[in-house]
Image (cartoon, grey):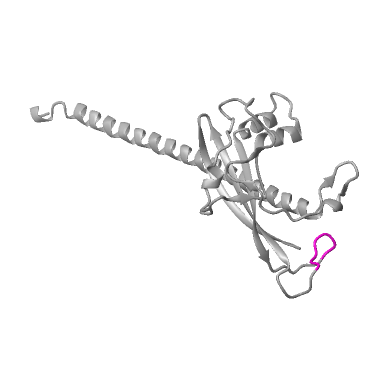
Amino acid sequence: MNNNEKGFALVLSLVLLLVMSLMGGALIVISAGDHQSNNRNEDYQQTFYVAETALLEGEKYILNQALGPWDVKSHKRDTKKRNLPSNTINFPTKITQKNYNSSLSSDIYLKVSDTCFNSFQITKANFKVVAAESWNFGIILRDSFNPKSGTEQKKEIDKLMKYYYQYFIEEIGAAPFKGTGKSIKKQAGNTGTDGIAYRVYGCGIKKEKDDINQVVALESIIVLPK
């Protein structure tokens, strides 16, 4: 072996070790990034589902007003209380916390704020709505299933305690309506503007410790007969 070749194997080993270390580190970084990306996607998907719940609950609120409130005891609607509500509530200054309060842990307690309102491009001054409500999604599931402590169901519901949905409903005016059926049907003829339109704004919100981690905003329009 020539003197010039002495120590070559050692240098080559060190170079290969360095290359392999860099490749291993890169794989770890890529894997961690994929894991974080998957978590963000899961959080967004769950928040989206909660936002869809907000829309459904807002639409159900308006339908219950139009058809009359449901009487749990008689299993019938009180048709004498049927009405098409108008905008009377100042928003976002007034929103009702329906199934939770500040007794929740500070990590998951969502204070009433204008986060949902700011998620939409609303430029009206003195904005008024028919109703504005905020619900804890996890508490709804907990009260529905009443899971036992230590079960997988209980663990999943505990995770969902960080999620909230909020909706507010705006009467947006007269609109054409054409429909048939026993529950909802128009009273006027086939011509003219004989319906009232409502816009339902819904938000899914994930609360993470001291800040709102994610918000998904959706909206829909529902037209009811006069």
Farthest residue toward the bottom? 191
Asked if residue 49 shows in the view, the reply is no
Can you give x and y, in whole percent of width and height, for residue 217 in the image? 56, 49
Q: Where the C terminus falls, by quadrant?
A: bottom right
Does the image show residue 166? Answer: yes
Q: Quadrant of the N terminus?
A: top left
Question: Residue at horizontal 70%, vertical 47%?
Answer: 57
25 vs 64, nearest the viewer: 64
Count of numbered labels shown in the rendering: 0
Q: Is residue 71 above or below residue 1?
A: below
Query: On the image, which quarter does residue 74 sit in?
Result: top right
67 w.r.t. 33: above or below: below
Q: Determine the residue located farthest toward the left in the rendered image.
A: 3
Image position, residue 41 (x, y; %): 52, 43
**What residue is drawn where x is 52% and y is 48%?**
119
Residue 61 in percent (x, y) is at 73, 49
Q: Which residues are magenta?
A: 181-187
Rendered location of residue 46, percent (x, y): 59, 42
53 horizontally vs 125: left or right:
right
Magenta segment, prevailing SS (helix, strand or loop): loop
| Drawn side of residue 52 relative to residue 191, left or right | left
Is residue 168 part of the magenta span, yes or no?
no
Q: Nearer the viewer, residue 55 or 46?
A: 55
Q: Quadrant of residue 50?
A: top right
Q: Quadrant of residue 116?
A: top right
